[in-house]
Amino acid sequence: MKELKIRRDRSPAVLRKLAKAEPDARIARRLLAIANALGGMSRAEAAASAGMDRQTLRDWVIRYNAHGVAGLCDQWSGGRPPRLTAEEQEELLDVVLAGADPEKDGFSAYTRDDLVAVAKKRFGKVMHPTSMGRLLRRLGLSRQKARPSHPLKDPAAAAAF
């Protein structure tokens, strides 16, 4: 097994000082683990002192060797791309804001299941109703519905009442 060397351009004391000034606790723990390993602690002890596994410390040492302290930052990949493109989301928002047509659609307000069917019909993309609900919240919509109004309602009689 080949021993992994840690770059020595900073002393353990300097790394500890950087860790103390670091606002991100995750980066501070990584700096402390590397400082402990540089200071003579075994890799397993240095990893345990920072609350990580020895293999995890090895991965952080490799990133530290390649990129310095900047390599210890989390690098999120952004996650899964959205199922609907920005244009499709805009079109779906227009559909929701226009509202359902009771004569044509057979219902007066869209449910998540109805919008899943719209997405499948218009865009050819299948979504779960829960995912549709998350998408609608991201688009700034809520689950509130307008209060139904009787078609024969007389506004003048309501005002006089």
Image: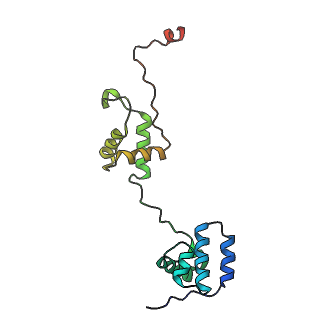
Please tell me how many numbered marks the rendered image carries.
0
Tell me which colouring the rendered structure shows: rainbow
Near-viewer residue (149 or 21): 21
Estimate the x, y position of residue 43 in percent, counting from the top left. Answer: 53, 83
Q: Is residue 109 shown above or below 61?
A: above
Between 56 and 138, the one lying in front of the other is 56
Q: Position of residue 136 (x, y in %)?
A: 44, 44
Quadrant assignment, res 20: bottom right
Q: Residue at x 36, y 29 (%)?
A: 101
Is the N terminus in the top left, top right, bottom left or bottom right quadrant? Answer: bottom left
Q: Residue at x 62, y 81 (%)?
A: 35
Q: Residue at x 62, y 71 (%)?
A: 28
* Quarter occupied by residue 92: top left
Residue at (44% x, 51% y) in the render: 86
In percent of width and height, residue 113 lies at 33, 40
Please tell me whether residue 99 is drawn above or below residue 68 in the rendered image.
above
Q: Which residue, as the protein is rendered here, is positioned at the far bottom?
A: 2
- Give percent across and percent down for residue 111: 37, 36
